[in-house]
Image: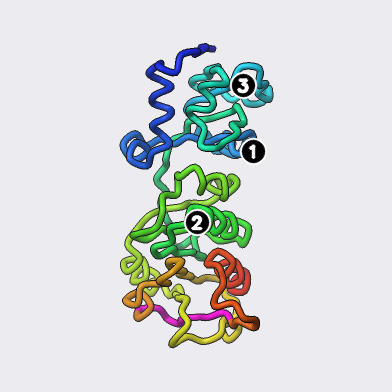
Amino acid sequence: MEYIQSAKNSRVKEWKKLLSKKDRDLTGKYIIEGEHLIDEALKTNDVLELILQENVQAPDSWLLKGIPSVTTITADISKIISATKTPQGVFAVCCKKESIIDLTKHKRFLLLDGVQDPGNIGTMIRTADAAGIDVVIMGEGSGDIYNPKVIRSAQGSHFHLPIITGNLHTWIETFKASLIPVYGTALEGAVTYKEVPPTDSFALIVGNEGAGVDPTILENTDQNLYIPIYGNSESLNVAVAAGILLYHLQK
């Protein structure tokens, strides 16, 4: 087990760079922090490196997983590579993975069109996981699923279901060819979600926090849905709305 004390060490610099989307994209790697997330990542064999702050004891089960690299670091280095104000002292470098979507097996989809807030993205991934959704598809203009805030908000759901990026127009055509109903979310030209019965397969599209779903996408859905507002609020948070609709549509 290697012990690193210097912040100038090349590996420390590489870990810190993984807090940047540019470097995550270049390397195909990302960094996670905290026991719960690492527990979930180890179940999928996504962990390339384990990084432990000195005086922080890792569970024995971690060290028996055959992780290629285990390194001990100082508390100061923990602060450098952490995306939080109070580091937990346990980190892992994971590999991004490409998922193959099989429409004979995957039947329930959540599509995000231009959703940018990391907390919202992570919450929707976590909610989709809990609601039994098979795949989450990130459209153009949406945030990075490997952003540390997204990963923290998703609470390990990254490791439970495929999360891919793609052109939503193309996916809508694919769903229609496979007879999977496509539902958009809109305030105008829509019906209340209660008018649509639960179903075995569906694709739900939710949109940007301010602008909503792209109108050109809404034109190609099978039906657009809205959630009635009974109080004085102008709208629902997109992650809350997604949760209501996913659980309603799930048969």
Left or right, residue 13 beside residue 88: left
Viewer-proximal residue among 140 and 237: 237
Q: Which mark is residue 63?
A: 3
Percent x, y for residue 153?
Answer: 57, 49
Q: Which residue is mark 2?
A: 121
Q: Amino acid at mark 1?
A: His
**Residue drawn at 59 percent across, 31 percent down:** 87
Callouts 3 and 1 close, C-beta under 8 Å: no
Q: Which mark is residue 28?
A: none
Looking at the image, residue 244 lies above or below residue 146: below
Q: Which residue is mark 1?
A: 36
Q: Which residues are magenta?
A: 220-227
Task: Classify residue 240 by image quadrant.
Answer: bottom right
Q: Nearer the viewer, mark 3 or mark 1?
A: 1
Task: Classify residue 15 by image quadrant.
Answer: top left
Q: Earlier in the sequence, mark 2 or mark 1?
A: 1
Q: Amino acid at mark 2?
A: Ile
For the N terminus, the image quarter is: top right
**Residue drawn at 33 percent across, 40 percent down:** 22
Q: CA distance from mark 3 to mark 2?
A: 32 Å
Is residue 225 covered in magenta? yes
Q: Earlier in the sequence, mark 3 or mark 2?
A: 3
Q: Nearer the viewer, mark 3 or mark 2?
A: 2
Task: Classify residue 89 by image quadrant.
Answer: top right
Q: Amino acid at mark 3?
A: Leu
Percent x, y for residue 107?
Answer: 50, 65
Viewer-proximal residue among 168 and 35: 35
